[in-house]
Amino acid sequence: MAEGRTLSVIVPVYDVAERFLAECFESILGQDFSDYELIIIDDGAKDDLATYIDSYDYRGADVHIIHQENRGVAVARNEGLRLATGEYVTFIDSDDHIEQGCFSTITDFAKKNLLDVLMFGIYLDRGGKRKEFSPYLTDIPLFSDKQKEEAALKCLVGILPFYECPPASADAAGSACAKLYRSDFLRSNRLSYTPGLKRAEDMEFNLRAIDKAENVGYLYRFYYVYRQLETSATFVYRPNGIEVFSDSLHAIREYITSSIKTDLFMQVYYMRCMFFFLESMDMDYLNPKNPDPLFVRLRKLKERSKQEPYKEAFANLRGEHLIFARKIPLFFIRHGMIVSLALFYTVYRMFTGR
């Protein structure tokens, strides 16, 4: 692996279809920019997929492959950061890909504006249909302090009605996708992913990164293609899945405690607690794959609502920043009306598709 590259591209691989991984690799190898190293972290992939990675034709690119036991995406990304020698670092998930011109444009924009962190636009791809996803609606070469605070809020919850920093959109900014980081900035601030987190690990990392960064910017270009798959970790049922959310929320709460944050930031955190609670209800407690009888699942959900971090959030979340459709679930939760909550959320999902 050559040293002194402009860009390090880190691709963690665990369980992905070969055709998607090939599309990911080809989108990287086909860039009009060659001053990069590709770091592939095989995080316990099956033998045939590991062989596929080793035997792939990388056409002379600077590629470094690490095979390790499955330890989760946070540890895999950290291993990539440890190995990275580039001036900048970006992450690409193995079932996603990038558009032509990505590397040259984002590195040029970051250099020109001396950025520690650069965000850019995403295409959400579901079944071949694309939708633009962008937290901002124009280039922002350098965020003001107010805009930087807003970016941190967007890491927690995207759809908020109270922003004072135009031109913001309703889309979030916490994903590992579509980000570029200056390597020296990450190293000097000892920024890495928190091992053990399995959901929202990128949100927690980006909260700390944006907080530490002096120069943050946004490029209004759609270069990252995020493939939404029902088999991804975002959609898969898992027993005790709410604990996965809770681990991330506890880590975020620890970050808030160690920082001086406004009441608004705390309200946004409480909103995230409620969103994760509802998401777990939908993915896990109401999932047909859950083997428990429905009344048992709903009883467990009610019990969990009275435990941290949800207990604090439901007690302190105020309604002024919630849309009406979110105020109703909060009312049901506070009054212990979990059956009504489940019925309302099921109907809400049917009509909105969310």
Image (tube, rainbow, N blue to C red):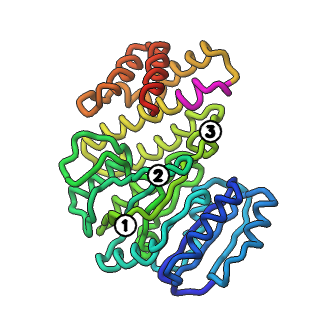
Q: Which residues are magenta?
A: 282-290
Residue at (37% x, 49% y) in the render: 172
Residue at (51% x, 84% y) in the render: 35
Does residue 172 appear left or right of residue 61 in this picture?
Answer: left
The quarter holding residue 206 reads bottom left
Is label 1 in a helix, a strand or a loop?
A: strand
Is label 3 in a helix, a strand or a loop?
A: loop
Residues at marks 1 and 3, CA–CA distance in whole angstroms: 30 Å
The quarter holding residue 96 reads bottom right
Mark 3: which amino acid?
Val
Q: Nearer the viewer, residue 59 or 130?
A: 130
| Numbered label attached to residue 236 | 3
Q: Is residue 322 visible?
A: yes
Residues at marks 3 and 2, CA–CA distance in whole angstroms: 22 Å
Q: Which residue is mark 1?
A: 118
Relative image position of residue 116 (x, y in whole percent): 36, 70
Residues at marks 1 and 2, CA–CA distance in whole angstroms: 23 Å
Q: Nearer the viewer, residue 227 or 135?
A: 227
- Mark 3, mark 2: which one is toward the viewer? 2
Does residue 49 appear left or right of residue 232 in this picture?
Answer: right
Relative image position of residue 8 (x, y in whole percent): 53, 75
Question: In the rendered structure, which disc, 3 or 2, sits on the residue that comes first in sequence?
Answer: 2
Residue lying furthest front in this view? 129
Q: Which residue is mark 2?
A: 130
Relative image position of residue 95 (x, y in whole percent): 60, 57
**Callout 1 touching callout 2 (CB < 8 Å):** no
Q: Is residue 204 visible?
A: no
**Callout 3 touching callout 2 (CB < 8 Å):** no
Mark 1: which amino acid?
Leu
| Numbered label attached to residue 71 | none
Residue 287: in magenta span: yes
Q: State whether residue 276 is above or below residue 102.
A: above
